[in-house]
Image (cartoon, helix red, strand yellow):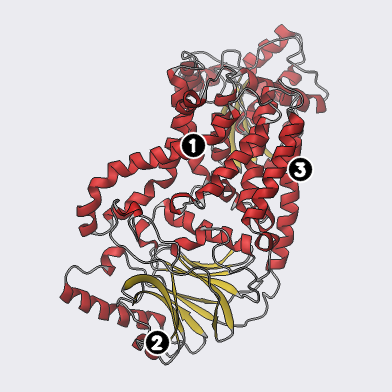
Amino acid sequence: MKVFVDVHDERWNRYKINFEKIVSALDSAVYRKSEVSIILTDDDEIHEINKTYRNVDKPTNVLSFELGDDVLLGDIYISFDTVKREAELAKIPFENHVAHMVVHGVYHLMGLDHVTDDEAAIMEMKEAKTLQKLGIKNPYVDTNEFVCADGSCCPGAKMIAWLKRFEICKNGFWQYVLYAVFGGVAAFGFAPFYCWWATLVGVAGAYWLTVRNKNIGGFWRTFLRVLPFGAVYSVAMFWWVLHSIYVVPEIAKQFAIWTVPGVIGLAIAGALIFSWPFIVIAQKKLSSSARPFMFAVVWVLVLWAREWLFTGFPWNPIANITMPWPGLANSMSVWGALGLTFVIIGFVAAAVEFLRNRARFMPMVIFSLLIGFGVMLGGYNMERADVGADKITHMIRIVQPGENQMQKASHDRAALLQRAAENIRDLVQLTGDTESVDFVVLPETAYPFILMKDDVIEMSQLVKKPMIFGANTFDNGGLYNSMVIVDADGGIDKIYSKSHLVPFGEYSPLGILPSPANLIKGGGAEIINLDNFIFAPAICYEIVFSDSLVPNGAGGINAIVNITNDNWFGNTPGTYQHLDMVRRYAIESGLPIIRANYSGISAFIASDGEIISSLPVGARGSIDGFVWGAHKTPYRAMGMNAWLKIILGFSVLCIAIANKKQD
């Protein structure tokens, strides 16, 4: 860590203090490339700063100002007068007390705090350990409180003082507020925010609120307590679904009335779904060592159930917060999103139990080892994904029209026909010269006319290359959302129809709830051969379901071709989260993915989830590329249900062993 020292009071020059040596002693492997600024000042200046920025009208020993950046951590102000006075009073060397102030200040910049007793214990332990490396005795042994005794030197001191006025009772009003806050915070770990730590903090906070009260009560009492977490977590993650109502004026006029009921529905669904892990661990029969395993396995069971129940919606497994960490994310090639979610949730719960009771360290050790094992296996999958990167087999062009849903829509029959013809001309023009490519991929619903299997596609004749595109097809009295594969002469070789339809968007759940369309679902997973390029087709939403695209026993697959239309969600988090669901599927299956989006994010995605090349939201154009590295992962070989059984068996064993010694 780099240290920059700025001397504002010449008295500091009398002492030869090695600030770089002090900072280097910190437990700061994550911050090796970070920078911190230390300003050596006096009581007058620090008093003014304290009053201006913290509303504390007096000098203090040290002030920390975070910049919210992992590289530029922030500034630390240290007052010569106060530190000198405190050192003399405590009868300790001035240099030692300065070192303590530096260590304390930098740990604040790293995010540590001492608002609660548990936080204070952790921070004091780290400070003592760091000072010991410098040959300085533990400053807290004699219970002196010179470091932030009144909280005036700490970030957010005014807020901390205000919060201390409220007692968060175990069964009081503020616990419900905290549950809601933790639920909202937990949603920020996913794309496009990627604040992975927020999800960990949110889940850990809700877990702590649940287990701190040993007299929790029965099922309904626990459910009512944790309800705000699930409700706010769900709304914060999925509010963008309702954005689709307002994309086209005609739909908005008809369905806008469902906005408030939709938000309420999301909240109720979230409360019902995400409460189960907390309800189960609230039972008194579980020891604190067993709870992390139970909490994690129930969370996984909930994720598995989301795959199947009520048409399924397994969006945003906790595993997806690891996308910024490829090594860990690629552990999904072995145990899938189920396994990685189990490890992350278990680690969070084990960490809370360890902080509550230092004797409960074994769950923390077990989940830490699983994380390390997962990173090792993830690295192996990334190596396999690189095989063949230097060999071009089929050059493919993805075309992204870059139009929003309003531009696609037509509002009367004459305009519909005119707009459809214009769309075809536009797609041909946008595709451009295809001499250098083997085939072209267009997004979902790109073709503006309803097709039948005997139709001839003029667009393909004009492009003079085989094409894959999305269209609505009509067969046996039913309308389908389909992927159409045509040859260079315009003949239809294959029609694959979507089997996982979107509730409320493509069909009416239960036959009574609102939907602008009522499509027929297709027959399920298939394998298609286009000029010796063998791929599994996927239309939009289908790719969020594990084990859904590759038929059992199928081999020799080069890639997955995913056509989609994220126009309905605009530039909301949903568009970016959908891309991460695609990346997750690539890792789990070991198959690269060719993704054509109407106006969202089109991309070539490697079999380790890496985005090779892409077009951003709203961009209009095309990208050429090829894919490589297709391989069969352990997860694809075993399947999601097999891994669920392994996780269940492992959890039952660990819970049984841990429960032998009750709290």
In front of the other: 171 or 305: 305
- How many neighbours does mark 1 have within 10 angstroms: few (below 14), some (14-19), or many (20 or more)? many
- How many neighbours does mark 3 have within 10 angstroms: few (below 14), some (14-19), or many (20 or more)? some
Residue type for callout 2: Ser
Residue type for callout 3: Leu
Q: Image quadrant of residue 36?
A: top right
Secondary structure state at the residue bearing disc 3: helix
Q: Image quadrant of residue 295?
A: top right
Residue 575 circle label: none
Badge 3 or badge 2: first in the primary sequence: 3
Q: Image quadrant of residue 632?
A: bottom right
Q: Residue furthest top?
A: 89
* Location of residue 550 in the rendering, given as x and y in whole percent from the top left corner: 58, 68
In front of the other: 422 or 149: 422
Secondary structure state at the residue bearing disc 2: helix
Q: Residue furthest front?
A: 476
Residue 185 circle label: 1
* Location of residue 145 in the rendering, given as x and y in whole percent from the top left corner: 66, 12
* Location of residue 19 in the rendering, given as x and y in whole percent from the top left corner: 72, 31
Q: How many marks?
A: 3
In front of the other: 587 or 570: 587
Query: Does the residue at mark 3 contact the one at mark 2 (Cβ under 8 Å)?
Result: no
Q: Which residue is mark 3?
A: 369
Badge 1 or badge 2: first in the primary sequence: 1
Residue type for callout 1: Val
| Mark 1 → mark 2, Cα distance in angstroms | 48 Å
Q: Which residue is mark 2?
A: 460
Q: Residue furthest bottom?
A: 489
Which callout, 1 or 2, points to the residue nearer the camera?
2
Q: Is residue 486 above or below residue 231?
A: below
